[in-house]
Image (cartoon, helix red, strand yellow):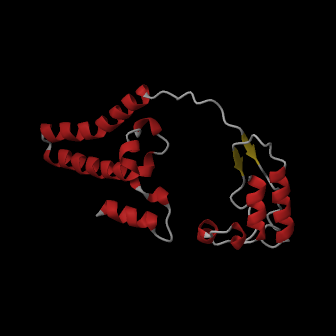
Amino acid sequence: AWISTEYWYTTGEFSWPWLVLGNGFSHDIWAVQWYEYTGVFGGSLWVLVCNLLVFEALRSRSRRRILAAAAAVVLPPAVSLCIGAAWRQPDQGTVRVSIIQPNVDCYDKFHGDVSRQERNLIDLIGQVPSDAQFILLPETAVPDYYWEPALSTTPDDSAAGPFWQELADSLR
């Protein structure tokens, strides 16, 4: 029930994924390499199972339960160490990246002249070298509000508006 509650929480309108138990180990990535197979919900399950096993071991003082709790705590990080030791960085060359910073004053961002901000963005994209493979922009680089599903489902680029048409043309 706990894991399903965490999953429901992360898919809701108001969520903060760092409240998921499995994300508690985000600073100790050496110990959670096994998350690549289970995800953070597997980490949450691990925390819950370890807590139950340690509780039962302390309550019963049974040697078998103490060993089971110790194995549950130690085994996944040990597997992670093996995964980390076996991993090799693939040699895939380099990538050409351009970063664009429109430098819009934070007080003018959503209250200033939208067309001027759009023009500035198009001009900056026009200065990107033609061999750039990726262009990075701040998450609020687009100066107006747009309904994202409409941008990806319109059969004609012009249906999304002239700014999006010009933006798409400048990226081709």
Q: Residue furthest front?
A: 156
Q: Nearer the viewer, residue 112 or 120?
A: 120
Residue 111 spot, x, y in % from top left: 81, 73
Q: Quadrant of residue 82?
A: top left
- The answer to whether 31 is drawn above or below residue 48 in the figure is above
Visible residue check, residue 145? no
Q: Residue at x 85, y 63 (%)?
A: 119
- The answer to whether 53 is drawn above or below residue 149 in the figure is above
Q: Quadrant of residue 7?
A: bottom left
Q: Residue at x 40, y 51 (%)?
A: 40
Visible residue check, residue 65? yes
The quadrant of the picture occupied by the N terminus is bottom left
Residue 67 spot, x, y in % from top left: 19, 36
Q: Residue at x 24, y 51 (%)?
A: 52
Residue 152 spot, x, y in % from top left: 61, 65
In the displayed structure image, the side of residue 87 where residue 52 appears, left or right: left
Q: Residue at x 71, y 55 (%)?
A: 138
